[in-house]
């Protein structure tokens, strides 16, 4: 039985993080991970908890992201499967932990993709409530839009998952739509 719960993930992230945008990112990735878990028939709450906690050390150590994660999480009683998944989202950037499971590959992919989905939704009167996959794909191709988002990582993740970009975008939107108020992505009044 996986050890990480949303309650524990929330407590742990709150112990290292204060910036609203990082909590917002955690909620977005968590929501997308829930949708990915449903797609794979996996434990939705567990995947959401891992997604929520994935940037545990980012605010404190942005230049050494994920180098201050494993030991504190181990000390807090987090299971090795969760720790490995969290470390794998930084593969080739700040860790050498290659994503291997569906959960790890999903986290690697949606970490960047949720940023693109959110940025696209913010440009629209309906926010994410009526956001279509085609709108996000158009922005994916426009390298100047949300330029910091690494499209190659998103595509690499989709390839690792053996899934089409459109399908993963659709799952991201579906997951994040369930948290649109918390993400500030609801329809504009």
Image (cartoon, grey):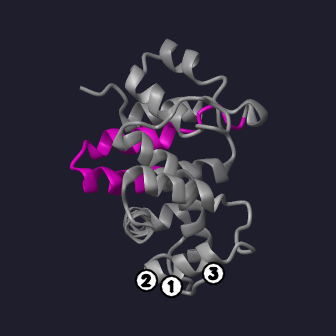
Q: Nearer the viewer, residue 70 or 75?
A: 70
Numbered disc 2: secondary structure: loop
- Is 171 situated left or right of 155 in this image? left
Q: Is residue 131 visible?
A: no
**Residue 52 magenta-drawn?**
yes
Instruction: Compute the Cα span from label 2 to label 1.
Output: 6 Å
Which stretch did the figure color magenta?
30-59
Residue 51 sits above or below residue 27 on the image = above
Image disc number at residue 123: 3
- Residue positioned 58% across, 37% down in the render: 91
Residue at the spot 37% in from the left edge and 64% down from the top edge: 171
Q: Quadrant of the N terminus?
A: top left
Position of residue 20 relative to residue 120, above or below, is above
How many marks the image carries: the answer is 3
Instruction: Indicate the secondary structure of the residue bearing disc 1.
Output: loop
First of labels 3, 2 by sequence position: 3
Other residues around mark 3 within 10 Å, as few (<14) / some (14–19) / many (≥20): few
What element does badge 3 sit on?
Answer: loop
Q: Which residue is mark 2?
A: 130
Location of residue 49 in the rendering, given as x and y in whole percent from the top left corner: 40, 39
Residue 16 occupies which quadrant of the picture?
A: top right
Q: Give the vertical position of 172 relative to 98 (above or below).
A: below
Which quadrant of the rendered structure holds the C terminus?
bottom right
Q: Does any portion of residue 140 appear in the rendered image? A: yes
Residue that mark 1 sits on: 126
The image quarter containing residue 164 is bottom left
Q: For this rendering, which residue is in front, 67 or 121?
A: 67
């Amino acid at each position: 039985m996986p050890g990480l719960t949303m309650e524990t993930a929330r407590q742990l992230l709150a112990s290292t993080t204060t910036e609203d945008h990082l909590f917002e990112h955690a909620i977005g990735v968590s929501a997308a991970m829930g949708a990915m878990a449903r797609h794979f028939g996996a434990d939705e709450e567990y995947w959401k908890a891992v997604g929520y906690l994935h940037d545990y050390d980012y605010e404190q150590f942005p230049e050494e992201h994920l180098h201050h994660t494993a030991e504190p999480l181990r000390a807090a009683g987090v299971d090795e499967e969760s720790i490995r998944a969290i470390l794998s989202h930084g593969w080739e950037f700040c860790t050498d932990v290659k994503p291997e499971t569906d959960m790890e590959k999903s986290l690697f992919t949606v970490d960047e993709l949720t940023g693109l989905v959110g940025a696209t939704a913010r440009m629209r009167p309906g926010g994410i409530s009526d956001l279509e996959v085609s709108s996000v794909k158009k922005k994916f191709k426009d390298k100047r839009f949300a330029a910091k988002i690494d499209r190659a990582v998103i595509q690499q993740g989709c390839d690792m998952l053996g899934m089409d970009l459109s399908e993963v975008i659709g799952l991201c939107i579906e997951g994040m739509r369930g948290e649109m108020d918390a993400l500030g992505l609801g329809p504009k009044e």
